[in-house]
Image (cartoon, helix red, strand yellow):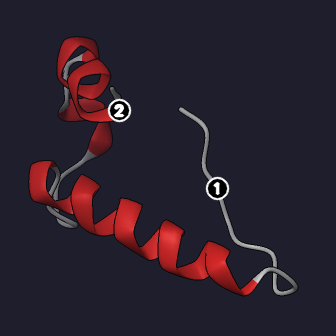
Amino acid sequence: MTTRGCSPVIVGQKGAIENANELIHQYIPKEMELNSISDEKLAFIVA
């Protein structure tokens, strides 16, 4: 899985990254270990 950060030069990126993080946290709580999630569930979340 690729991680993404935002460029300090492009202001609109921060909002997009924060929105993506919020959507991911709907499926994966912060406390959950990522290695406990199946590949199928990760594929569903990313798609």
Residue 46: name its quadrant. top left
Residue bearing the label numbered 1: 4
Q: Which residue is mark 2?
A: 46
Dot 2 or dot 1, earlier in sequence: 1
Q: Are marks 2 and 1 in contact (CB under 8 Å)?
A: no
Reply above or below: 9 against 5. Answer: below
Which residue is rendered at x = 11% and y = 58% of the image?
26
User: Is residue 35 shown left or right of residue 32?
Assistant: right
Q: Residue furthest right?
A: 9
Tell me the element at label 2. Answer: helix
At x 37%, y 69%, the residue is: 19
Foreground residue, 45 or 34? 45
Q: Position of residue 27 (x, y in %)?
A: 12, 48
Quadrant where the C terminus lies?
top left
Q: CA distance from mark 2 to mark 1?
A: 13 Å
Which one is in front, 40 or 14? Answer: 14
Extreme-front residue of the structure: 12
